[in-house]
Structures are given as C-alpha cells and as structure tokens.
Amino acid sequence: KAGVTQTPRYLIKTRGQQVTLSCSPISGHRSVSWYQQTPGQGLQFLFEYFSETQRNKGNFPGRFSGRQFSNSRSEMNVSTLELGDSALYLCASSLFRTSGSGETQYFGPGTRLLVL
Amino acid sequence: GIQVEQSPPDLILQEGANSTLRCNFSDSVNNLQWFHQNPWGQLINLFYIPSGTKQNGRLSATTVATERYSLLYISSSQTTDSGVYFCAVLAYSGAGSYQLTFGKGTKLSVIP
C-alpha cells in the first residue's frame, strides 16, 4: 500500500506570493491533518480535514487555509507569504477523524517551503 | 494547552550504547505516540502507547499515564538510529476535537 505523498517536495517563493501544497493520503484514509515544522516553534498543528470538512484548526492566521476533496486528497494554501512561513509542511493521514480513542497518524515526506 | 517536554534535547552516543529518552506531559492525555524523524524530514511512527510497555526490536517504550511521562529506550544503538525523536500526545482541544501536540524532540547522533 502506498504511503502518504506530498507535492511538491521543495518550493521557493517570494514574500507576498501565495502557495498551494498538495497531500494524497494512504488509500482508504479519510482524515488529513497538516503540520508546520520550524526550528523555532517545532511541530505545530495547522488543521484537520475529514469528509471534506475542516474539523479542527490550530492557532494560525487566516492566511493559512485548506480544503479536502471527495477522494480525500487535501490541499493547503498560504496567501501573502511572509519570511516566517519558511518551514517544512507535513501532512498526515489516518483512517478516521482524530478522536479520543486515538488513531495512528501516518506522515508524508513533507514539502520544504523557502520564502525569500 | 497541554505542554510536552522532552529530554535531553541533544544526545551523542557511541555505536552500540544504550539510551533512554524521556517525555513529560502536563495534563491527562488520550494517547501518546513516539516518532523518529530521519535526516530527510520523514516522520516514522515508532509506538502508539497510551499506557504500559511495548517493544519492537531494539526499541521499547513505556508510558505511565498516571504520572504523566513516557520513556523510549534504544538499545545497541546504530548509526541509522540518528535523527530526531518526537513524543506527541493526543488531547482534547475543544469543540469535540482532538489534536496531536508535539514535544521539541531529542536529537540523537550515533557515531561509529
């Protein structure tokens, strides 16, 4: 079974531009979560999508948005890029929505975004 | 929100040595996972361990939920064990939602 895939793997943008990242979950998985990893803040939760609906959102500005399609693939968009948005963006998939019983999340290889 | 602290932040080991990594969390959690991030950034699941002890080859983990900590043991370390080890806890974040909160990680370097 193929793992989580993310495209593109590397991206260079300039301040003020926007960017769209893509994540394809493991086949059959319906939940996709996005995380930002920076040296200063570490790994931080961005949002979770399940059944095409955003179910949970971390503490990030409205410039960060996402969506999920009927095939569970997800995209994340960052508008008006800032230097501080330079990071590794990871997506993770799981069978069901993250719940109290816990559901193992499987991570993709990430997209490295550099904002100049 | 919940706080997750990992120690030590950095660890250098000679190949073949054993080590213990610690994860402390500030509140009750529904679950806990250990991950290994390789030098290319890929996060690999190691253990899904809300309580008790699990073993997988040279790695084992113990979570004592009542005392709010978890330990990851690496025995007979190999250079391929190098990377960053993260502890992540699953906790309620409000409005019927749960999310993973990660610690800052332990960077392990195994030298030949």
Image (spheres, coloured by chain):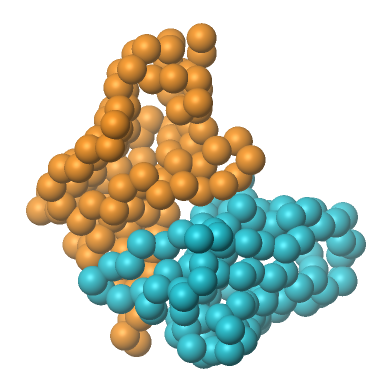
Chain colours: A cyan, B orange
The quarter of the picture where residue A62 lies is bottom right
Give left or right: position of A3 versus B86.
Answer: right
Residue A51 placed where, x, y %?
Answer: 48, 88
Residue extending farthest left: B66
Identify which residue is drawn at 10% across, 53% down.
B66
Considering only vertical position in the picture, is A46 above or below B56? below
Give me the residue at 51% from left, 42% from top: B37
Q: Between A86 and A33, which is closer to the camera in this rendering?
A: A33
Q: x%, y% of residue B51?
A: 15, 52
B40 up-or-down from B10: above or below: below
A9 and A47: which is toward the camera: A9
**Residue occupying the far front of the picture:** A1
Quadrant of the image occupied by residue A22: bottom right
Position of B32 with respect to A74 (left or right) is: left
Is residue B54 at least partly visible in the picture? yes
Residue drawn at the location 23% of the way across and 65% of the way down: B30
Residue A77: image x %, image y %?
72, 76
Q: Quadrant for the C terminus of chain A, please.
A: bottom right
Task: Please say if B94 is above or below A36.
Answer: below
Residue at 78% x, 54% y is A10
- B56 to the left or right of B13: left
Q: Position of residue B73 (x, y in %)?
A: 27, 30
